[in-house]
Amino acid sequence: MTVDHENERWWFAAEILTGVNGIVGWHRQRQVYLELTGDPEVGVIPPLRTEARMQWNFRVDKTLASQGKALVYPTDTVARAYAGVAGLLNLMCMFDAVMLSLLGIRGEPASASKQPGQQENQQ
């Protein structure tokens, strides 16, 4: 439930970069929200950044915590941060691979002692 595209859009963008884990988490979170919106106590999702939305989020968090389906503070914050950082690290790896490919660099660089045309420094 840390992959929350409704309330934490920037974290969601970072978490979705984790790959299959982020996509499965997003799908599962959507399923849980759809189940809860059928609950008359929880009701329909109100618009973002309103008092009604904050109250709705509180009711959803309370319902999920009582059912054992959601992480609660501070565990949810830590899980969201770890997943977001993992996604951003994946983004850095993708960027690195693309840049090296564009520069024509393939594979691991040869070590200094094995490069042809270089002489070892002998003192």
Image: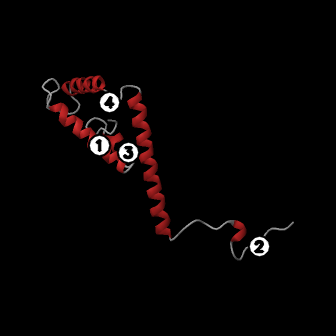
Q: Which residue is mark 4?
A: 70
Give residue 95's position: percent from left, percent from top: 45, 57
Q: Secondary structure at mark 2?
A: loop
Q: Quadrant for the N terminus, please.
A: top left
Nearer to us: label 3 or label 4? 4
For the residues labelled 2 and 1, the Cα–Cα distance comes to 56 Å
- 38 sits left or right of 102 in the view: left
4 vs 2, front mark: 4
On the question of residue 107 being in view, the answer is yes
Left or right of 39 in this view: 123: right
Mark 2, Cα crowd under 10 Å, few <14 / some 14-19 / many 20+, is few
Residue annotated with mark 2 = 119
Q: How many marks?
A: 4
Which of 41/10 is in front?
41
Q: Amino acid at mark 3?
A: Ala
* Amino acid of disc 2: Gln
Q: Earlier in the sequence, mark 4 or mark 2?
A: 4
- Disc 3: CA contacts within 10 A as few (<14), some (14-19) or many (>=20): many
Task: Kindly identify which numbered label has been placed on residue 14.
Answer: 3
Q: Secondary structure at mark 1?
A: helix
* Gap in angstroms between the C-alphas marked 3 and 4: 20 Å
- Residue annotated with mark 1: 26
**Residue 2: image location, x then y, percent:** 34, 36
Quarter of the C terminus within the rendering: bottom right
In the figure, residue 42 lies in which quadrant? top left
Q: Cα distance, mark 4 to mark 1?
A: 13 Å
Contact check, label 3 and label 2, Cβ < 8 Å: no
Sequence order check, earlier mark of 3 and 4: 3
For marks 4 and 1 on the same chain, the one whose residue lies earlier in the sequence = 1
Dot 4 falls on a residue whose secondary structure is loop
**Is the C-beta separation of discs 2 and 1 under 8 Å?**
no
Query: Between marks 3 and 1, how big is the CA–CA gap?
Result: 12 Å
